[in-house]
Image (tube, coloured by chain):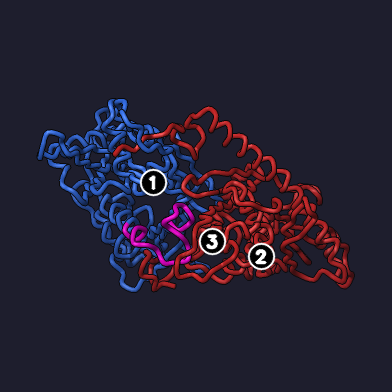
Amino acid sequence: MATQPQPVPALSFPRPIFAALSPHPFLAAHLASDKAIRANGRKPQEFRTPGINTGSLTHCNGSAVVRLGNTAVVCGIRAEILRAEDIANPIVTGVRREDEDGEEDDREEIEGLRLLVPNIELATGSAPSHLPGSPPSTTAQTLVTRIRSLLISAHLLRADDLRITYAPPVPEDLDTPDVEQEEEIKGYWVLYIDTMFLSLDGAAFDAAWCALLAALRDTLIPHAYYDSDLETILCSDDPSQARKLKLRGLPVPSTFAVFESTEGDKEGDSEREKAWVLSDPDAFEEGVCKETVTVVVDGSGGTKGQSEENVRKIEKSGGGVIGRENMKGLIKRGVERWGVWERVLNDK
Amino acid sequence: MNTDRRRINAPSGGTTPPIFARTVKVPGYLESLRPSRTRGPNELRKIFLQTGIIPSASGSAYLEVPLPRTSNSSSLIPPRSSLKITCSIQGPKPLPRSAPFSPSLLLTTAVKFAPFASRNRRGYIRDSIERDLGVHLETALRGVLIGERWPKSGVEVIVTVVEGDEDGWWGDSTPGIGGGITGSGMGAGWGLLNILAGCITVSSAAIADAGIDCVDLVSGGVAAIVRNPDTKKKEGEKGDFVRMLDPCPAEHQDIVAACVVGYLAGRDEVTEIWLKGNVGAIPDELIDGATQAAVGSLSVLKEVVMEAVEAKFQGQVIQEKEGLKRKHPQQDAEMVG
């Protein structure tokens, strides 16, 4: 963008054409101007305001629609029953292992039995680059793998919420009074977490994860029990008996993109490298940025009254601009962002 | 199905949807959940339609037939389904160099159900039902577009069914319970007709949003012939039949025939007919009913398209960023050097 009057009127283009023809100088001109505003009108550190709507899908136990600017995601969670007989390699049989904090170590159980089945569909016409009729693109596969690994490593769900147990009635046999009544696991709830992108405009991971999180918080699991007469697992359709999932923490990701521009200095050979860290990049910015960082922060830890921020995950790829110092700044920005999401998630 | 290595798969043992105890154990409970039609035979369901929901697509629209507000706090089982469809138009864009010459616009349609679209979870790979719907939709739209204005180009109409109408009431398909009632609805695909009508209407709105030249706005409508439930009991008699516009299959136990049309009201032309069931010798009444329903959805469609056009042009004048498609003020940038 011309900041000083040019002696010779140069070629003049409407903005969209300029952006399409030379995206890199277009964004560089915006950021280098006095106002330092991105092409989409946001400041470099500015995130988009999220919007959440939950419980809109009829056939799901929990669902959420998340809007992040022009990115819109719908996530539906459906619970189905995995019977104990159908498990090929049982991992635990009725034994509960607890560590010192009274917290179960159930990661192996959830991961090994594949109780969480997240999937993401991008090919819904959400963006011109993702068209239906072909297998999931590399982007879609990468995205779902990242989501799944965060879901498991963040230790978000409790296996206890997903178990369906049965305590057989104590036989009225007086010979064995000491036998402790032991609960056996008759099955598990399997959560199918399907996320569809209605519209994609950058920050796919943030939007997909937050939709998943909002949907999980909305999920109602019916009360399930083993019926010894019918020898099957039955559920109660009474909403007052159904329960919500007890999630551990509230990890929230923030994505940043690093935009680099090289300006040849007029005086001579020294090239000035300038870099901007853009919060919550949109599709256009993602197209011109090589380096991206995703910081997952959870501020819900700690005792009541004082929050304690924990970094749950950092992903960084491409480029070498973000160093140790910059990363601290990004984590701070991530913590602020966590506060925004937390408010939106609790308000609904 | 379980060997899709590009997606995350379910446990290999397979999972079953939950069975609710009261539907099995309490006699008559299942029947008490059966929804019934509260509208008149010629009354249509309300439609919500919006265009321009996907800014990166050249045109897009969202259609919803919301559930009637009921206070069903006593059960977790949803009595019926709503209809939620999005449509995105990609193009018109030039065909790849390898494609043979085409003098007019090549239309491709894709219909896909979301995994949570129906009571039973659906897979990600497109099945025959979805292909079938895609072909029907293509037929309905082909005659509407003025394809000669885009030689050597193609356009893709991508429809995602986020939630679809069911083929019948779910309780009728549950075997061995509730006294063994079997509705004629299940498996006959009555719900598909409603979905197709929705697809036609939403695609039409999206095409208008994309600014592709059409001869007219096409809209979809469904009518059905239903056996009157009050006289159903008398076996042997023919029973009297009622024509219903915009039937919700879950509300009717005995649908005899149904028909969906893609209708151009301005020219009184039909681009698509899909008729199912035993209609008798004269299907005219049924088709008339379907066109009436199509005219009903057209009134909504017209209004929405008009509003969208007005908003678009206002946005251009005010040069604000409230117009979703135009984030940038319309000032020219100079390219130096």
> Residue at horizontal 76%, vertical 60%?
B270
Q: Secondary structure at mark 1?
A: helix
**C-alpha span from label 3 to label 1:** 21 Å
> Residue at horizontal 46%, vertical 65%?
B96
Q: Nearer the viewer, mark 2 or mark 1?
A: 1
Q: Secondary structure at mark 3?
A: strand
Task: Determine the colour of chain B.
Answer: red
Mark identifier at residue A85: none
- x, y percent for residue A83: 42, 67
Q: Main secondary structure of the magenta part?
A: loop
Q: Chain of mark 2?
A: B
Amino acid carrying mark 2 in the image: Thr
Task: Determine the colour of chain A.
Answer: blue
Amino acid carrying mark 1 in the image: Ala
- Tell me which segment is drawn in magenta: A122-142
Co-location on one chain, circles 3 and 1: no
Residue marked by disc 1: A20
- x, y percent for residue B265: 77, 51
Q: Which corner quadrant of the image does residue A344 belong to?
A: top left
Q: Which corner quadrant of the image does residue A333 belong to?
A: top left
